[in-house]
Amino acid sequence: MKLIIIAEAGVNHNGNLKIAKKLVDVAKLARADYVKFQSFTPDKLVTKNAPKANYQKSNFNKKETQNSMLHKLQLSILDHLKLIKYCKKKKINFLSTAFDIDSLKFLLKNKINLIKIPSGEITNLPLLRYIKKQKKKVLLSTGASTLKEVEQAIKVLNKKKNDITVLQCNSAYPTPISDLNLRTLNTFKKRFNCNIGLSDHSLSSIVPAAAVAMGATVIEKHFTLSRKMVGPDHKSSLEPKELKQMIQNIKEIEISLGSSMKPITKSESENRKIIRKSLVAQTNIHKGEKFTNKNIIPKRPAIGISPMNIQKILGKKAKKNFKPDQIIKI
């Protein structure tokens, strides 16, 4: 599966279409494959008095409810349509995470080619069952989930191996490096026989590249125009230069993975003879004299008999005279 890099704008537009478009520009400049937003109807997502998480309180109005906060961060249907059009103009794929069935129906109507299930919806059986019916590839985030809960969601979705990617995720914003647990990627691959990826909420621009080296085929990372902006997710997001560097790191790792067959590459082939050795005369060797460990020795360059074949040479008689450092030929 081709590597997919998703630049997660999320709600870092603060409900402002102009900021959302700037985020699209940043994602495009950084060479992301997708720029992703979030689609929701606040009153269908949370109760009116639902409290905010501590991380949401720290960079947003502490006293207001989660419902009130989400109303300020919501993009209208018209905003969505304008963003979709803008992404097409900028030649970057548009994606959005739906937090309810109606929002997902809207996105499907507008031909998104991936369905992203956020960590908080992994136990939302009605939503999972609806997604099961859709002929779309699925990205499943697993933040704050147990292996059993992940397995239950995968069974409900009942997707073919190549139609689901399970993303290791931690739902702390930002996530401490020590809590990322990248080895979980190996567990997912072995236990569920699926594609794997990382939804990373840390502030590291290196960790996603490590995940790619471990076999991740999808990387999702939050980004913002500035961590100084007011809003719930800005402090746990990369800034534009960091996003660009992260994607550069990933692409270098992707290229460096290369082949698993240990080929001799074109770049190193010219050095092969220079760094390897041949059997050469260590002393004067006269015609008819036997080759021994005392009169032949391995030395560079590798233009004669390989030292790996020395046992085939020892004991044989020289067919001509050899001077010290002369390449042995039989």
Image (cartoon, rainbow, N blue to C red):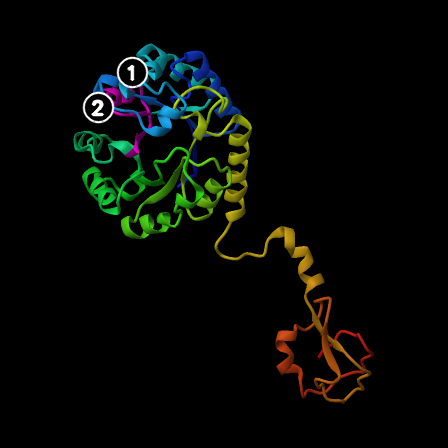
Answer above or below: position of 81 versus 35.
above
Which region shows up in magenta?
97-119
Question: Residue 275: x percent and y percent?
Answer: 69, 63
Cα–Cα span, label 1 and label 2: 21 Å
Residue in the image at 40% along x and 41% along y: 217
* SS for callout 2: helix
How many residues crowd mark 2 within 10 Å: few (<14), some (14–19), many (20+)? some
Position of residue 76 measured from the top left corner of the image (x, y, whole percent): 32, 12
Quadrant assignment for the C terminus: bottom right
The residue identified by callout 2 is: 101
Give the amino acid at mark 1. Ser
The label shown at residue 243 is none
Please give the label number shown on residue 68: 1
Is 98 or 177 nearer to us in this picture? 177
Q: Secondary structure at mark 1?
A: helix
In magenta segment, residue 122: no
Residue 41 can be seen in this image: no
Foreground pick, 259 / 172 = 172
